[in-house]
């Protein structure tokens, strides 16, 4: 019997689906039209112009359709149309309105749409600026839009599903939910709330980081499209000039997006840092590294005609690596190795077709033009700018290959049926540290070198002062901060040399002018980033240490020795501070734990210094998420997060209730240990020789006693002897209490076949201790890192403006 559902808004779905079909069709027409426009351009210019007009019109229709998709999806999210699975899956009514943006791109369909939107912006800009390159470049851009919009089609071709459409999948029709009784109710929407947004994404960084990152990904398409156009048109020496500003724009935007991700991780995640070499982090870093190399090599070729093959290869590779990263993060293959990866929506095949199409296209065009890459090229001088730019690009390529190969470990495991473990942070650092050191040295000296050839004595003379300052500073910092690892000292010296050399270049060579100073400023920022990373991570200090008198083994912490247990009102020394946990409070879904820090004065008096409030976001569906709190100083950060706590907030009116409602049942075999809310409970053994008279039991009763050893958080031992008895076929449990812990043990079940007993453990709410387990880390001089990020972004923007003006 057909059910007439009440309140469902199906028109937005039909409208959104219509926009998806229109966007796909218009992109297809645009690609074909621009293709014919380029093919006809040399022999039939009038016909070519006609095809170009059709291509432009089709791309504008495609653009309007994409804007329609965006507007419709925002409407559905804003008005909580939970009849649609995408809306239900990524939002709920209690979510703050400002996080609707995060809901939009949390899912695969929304993130593909965001990527498509940025290509629309770029494509319309190219149609106004590409001039003679327009038809060839827009053929590539439109072809990419065909693939991206196909990811949202949600149609079946025979038995294969093409894309996932957020507008056609109703929650009541979804295979996972179609059979539940709720949808037998015609008015089910009145009782429905959404699943909600991932608590990790409920952060302001997640409203600005993803669009910035995806714009960076989208910008890698432009150098790729110009490179393809150059190979296609066999104009190998002209494509770099229009592509170069776009390449540096991509470097600036994608780099900013990556840095934003690091800031989000530091502020919102609880792993204790800003970079963890997570596969998704690596997937955005690798294309940026190759894009940086591409932009610099393109600069060489534009000025001196050298390194054509490398410029083409890196330009093509950057976009292809974005496609490969898309496959890694969206195919579900990283599900066990990254917390950021998307789940598989059955689009792995499409993603591979998308990837291999552009790999084969690039290989084919490179092969056809291979003979022209090295014809007539001059041998580069050892002391020329182009030679060392090439070496720098080679280092970036090696760095990216190392990261990419190891990030792809799940792929290799699946291909070769292996079970190699994913590399840890130390592994990545060990390989990337020397590469970063070499790169910093090259960046320090690169601008002092001239094209063609340089008198090395002049370069050494100009670098003498920065080198001396770097050596002296390295010695002082290494001694003061006790840095004695050879590789750390080398990176310290290289990063300082990079900073001083580029500052000297701006001050002495450029005479303090800002017009051409973009590269120097960006390079100084890069040196500051390396310096900040080195000092803040190599010398970070855990000031929280496991209490000697507390047992933390029951909490199963991954880094237990660096955690401290704080009972309410107790004061514990941590580093230079004395710390007190004063209690918790709740606001919305967040539970805040107030931790006061005190400094000790010469007379022994403790003075209040500051308070931190690390929090835990309570999310019953997706799991609770701890978020750190950080106190910022000029020379350090004190970073804290809660690793274990009781998140319940006791109502003051009920604080003296005899028992709380959560009596927990635990199953024991002799020797087993379980953790209650305030102690460890160990079953020592069972005793069948119970003194029945002591418990008022008749001789005919059957009785078994249990002996428990209970360790509280102060490692104090308590003994308890509850009894299980059967009298006249009735179970008569005889519980025991431990007043100091407000605990009662009720031994009420025996399973002789399994050799287990069941005991109900109840803790008196009034006596239940309030405590947290916390980790606190000091990051020295981390502000150097954040300052470097800002300086590098500003410098790259300055260089970009200069390039655009020259173009």
Image (spheres, grey):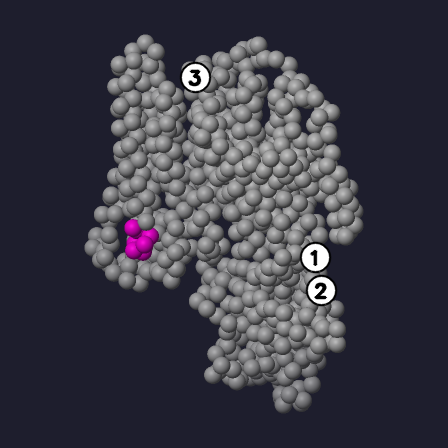
As drawn, the label of residue 232 is 3
Question: Which element carries disc 1, helix, strand or loop?
Answer: strand
Q: Is residue 196 magenta?
A: no
Q: Is residue 283 or residue 85 the one in the foreground?
A: 283
**Residue 96 position by quadrant:** bottom left
Q: CA distance from mark 2 to mark 1?
A: 9 Å
Is 87 rendered above or below residue 385? below
Q: Which span of residues is magenta-colored?
A: 75-81
Question: Which element carries disc 2, helix, strand or loop?
Answer: loop
**On the image, numbered disc 2 is attached to which residue?**
575
Residue 225 x/y as whole percent: 43, 25
Question: Which element carries disc 3, helix, strand or loop?
Answer: helix
Mark 2 or mark 1: which comes first in sequence?
1
From the viewer's perspective, tell me whether residue 483 is left or right of residue 57: right
Q: CA distance from mark 1 to mark 3?
A: 56 Å
Callout 2 touching callout 1 (CB < 8 Å): yes
Is 623 rendered above or below residue 535? below
Callout 3 touching callout 2 (CB < 8 Å): no
**On the image, numbered disc 1 is attached to which residue?**
541
Residue 773 x/y as whole percent: 63, 66
The residue at the point 64 percent across, 47 percent down is: 532
Quadrant assignment for the C terminus: top left
Q: Residues within 10 Å of mark 2 (few under 14, many from 20)?
A: some
As drawn, the label of residue 450 is none
Callout 1 touching callout 3 (CB < 8 Å): no
Q: CA distance from mark 3 to mark 2?
A: 64 Å
Mark 3 or mark 2: which comes first in sequence?
3
Q: Is residue 174 or residue 635 the one in the foreground?
A: 635
């Amino acid at each position: 019997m057909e059910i007439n559902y009440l309140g469902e808004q199906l028109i937005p779905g039909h409208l959104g689906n219509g926009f998806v079909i229109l966007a796909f069709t218009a992109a297809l027409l645009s690609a074909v039209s621009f293709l014919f426009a380029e093919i006809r351009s040399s022999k039939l210019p009038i016909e070519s112009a006609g095809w170009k007009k059709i291509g432009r019109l089709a791309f504008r229709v495609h653009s309007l359709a994409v804007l329609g998709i965006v507007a419709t999806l925002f409407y559905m999210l804003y008005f909580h149309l939970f009849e649609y699975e995408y809306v239900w899956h990524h939002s709920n009514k209690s979510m703050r309105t400002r996080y609707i943006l995060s809901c939009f791109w949390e899912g695969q369909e929304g993130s593909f749409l965001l990527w498509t939107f940025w290509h629309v912006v770029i494509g319309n800009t190219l149609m106004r600026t590409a001039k003679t390159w327009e038809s060839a470049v827009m053929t590539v851009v439109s072809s990419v839009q065909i693939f991206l919009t196909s990811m949202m089609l949600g149609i079946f071709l025979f038995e294969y599903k093409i894309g996932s459409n957020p507008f056609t999948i109703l929650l009541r029709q979804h295979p996972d939910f179609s059979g539940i009784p709720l949808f037998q109710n015609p008015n089910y929407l009145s009782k429905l709330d959404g699943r909600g947004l991932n608590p990790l994404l409920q952060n302001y960084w997640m409203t600005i980081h993803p669009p910035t990152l995806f714009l960076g990904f989208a910008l890698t398409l432009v150098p790729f499209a110009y490179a393809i156009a150059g190979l296609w048109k066999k104009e190998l020496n002209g494509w770099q000039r229009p592509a170069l500003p776009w390449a540096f724009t991509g470097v600036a935007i994608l780099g900013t997006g990556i840095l934003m991700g690091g800031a989000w991780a530091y502020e919102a995640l609880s792993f204790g840092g800003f970079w963890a070499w997570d596969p998704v982090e690596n997937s955005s870093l690798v294309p940026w590294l190759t894009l940086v190399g591409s932009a610099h090599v393109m600069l060489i070729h534009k000025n001196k005609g050298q390194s054509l093959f490398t410029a083409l290869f890196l330009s093509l590779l950057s976009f292809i690596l974005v496609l490969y990263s898309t496959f890694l993060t969206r195919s579900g293959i990283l599900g066990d190795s990254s917390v950021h990866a998307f789940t598989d929506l059955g689009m792995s095949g499409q993603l591979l077709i998308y990837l291999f199409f552009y790999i084969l296209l690039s290989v084919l065009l490179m092969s056809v033009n291979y003979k022209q890459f090295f014809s007539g090229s001059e041998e580069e001088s050892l002391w020329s700018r182009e030679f060392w730019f090439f070496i720098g690009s080679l280092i970036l390529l090696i760095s990216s290959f190392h990261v990419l190969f190891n990030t792809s470990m799940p792929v290799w495991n699946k291909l070769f049926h292996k079970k190699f473990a994913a590399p840890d942070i130390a592994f990545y650092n060990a390989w990337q540290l020397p590469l970063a050191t070499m790169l910093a040295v090259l960046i320090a000296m690169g601008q002092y070198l001239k094209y063609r050839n340089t008198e090395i004595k002049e370069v050494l003379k100009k670098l003498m002062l920065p080198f001396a300052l770097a050596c002296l500073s390295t010695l002082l910092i290494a001694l003061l901060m006790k840095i004695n690892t050879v590789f750390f000292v080398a990176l310290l010296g290289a990063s300082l040399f990079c900073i001083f050399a580029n500052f000297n270049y701006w001050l002495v060579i450029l005479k303090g002018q800002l017009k051409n100073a973009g590269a120097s400023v960006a390079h100084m920022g890069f040196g500051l980033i390396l310096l900040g990373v080195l000092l803040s991570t190599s010398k970070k200090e855990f000031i929280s240490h496991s209490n000697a008198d507390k047992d933390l083994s029951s909490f199963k912490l991954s880094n237990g020795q660096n955690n401290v247990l704080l009972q309410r009102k107790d004061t514990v020394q941590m580093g230079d501070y004395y710390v007190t946990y004063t209690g918790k409070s709740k606001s919305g879904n967040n539970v805040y734990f107030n931790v006061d820090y005190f400094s000790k004065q010469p007379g022994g008096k403790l003075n209040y210094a500051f308070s931190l409030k690390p929090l835990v976001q309570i999310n019953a569906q997706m799991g609770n998420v701890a978020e750190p709190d950080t106190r910022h100083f000029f020379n350090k950060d004190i970073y804290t997060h809660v690793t274990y706590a009781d998140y319940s907030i006791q109502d003051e009116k009920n604080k003296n209730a005899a028992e709380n409602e959560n009596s927990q049942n635990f199953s024991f075999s002799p020797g087993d240990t379980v953790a209650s809310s305030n102690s460890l409970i160990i079953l020592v053994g069972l005793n069948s020789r119970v003194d029945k008279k002591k418990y008022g039991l008749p001789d005919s009763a059957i009785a078994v006693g249990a002996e428990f050893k209970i360790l509280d958080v102060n490692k104090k031992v308590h003994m308890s002897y509850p009894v299980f008895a059967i009298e006249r076929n009735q179970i008569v449990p005889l519980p025991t209490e431990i007043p100091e812990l407000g605990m009662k043990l009720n031994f009420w079940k025996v399973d002789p076949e399994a050799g287990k007993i069941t005991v109900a453990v109840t803790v008196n709410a009034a006596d239940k201790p309030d405590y947290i387990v916390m980790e606190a880390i000091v990051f020295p001089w981390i502000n150097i890192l954040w300052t470097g990020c800002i300086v590098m972004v500003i410098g790259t923007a300055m260089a970009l403006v200069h390039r655009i003006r020259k173009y």
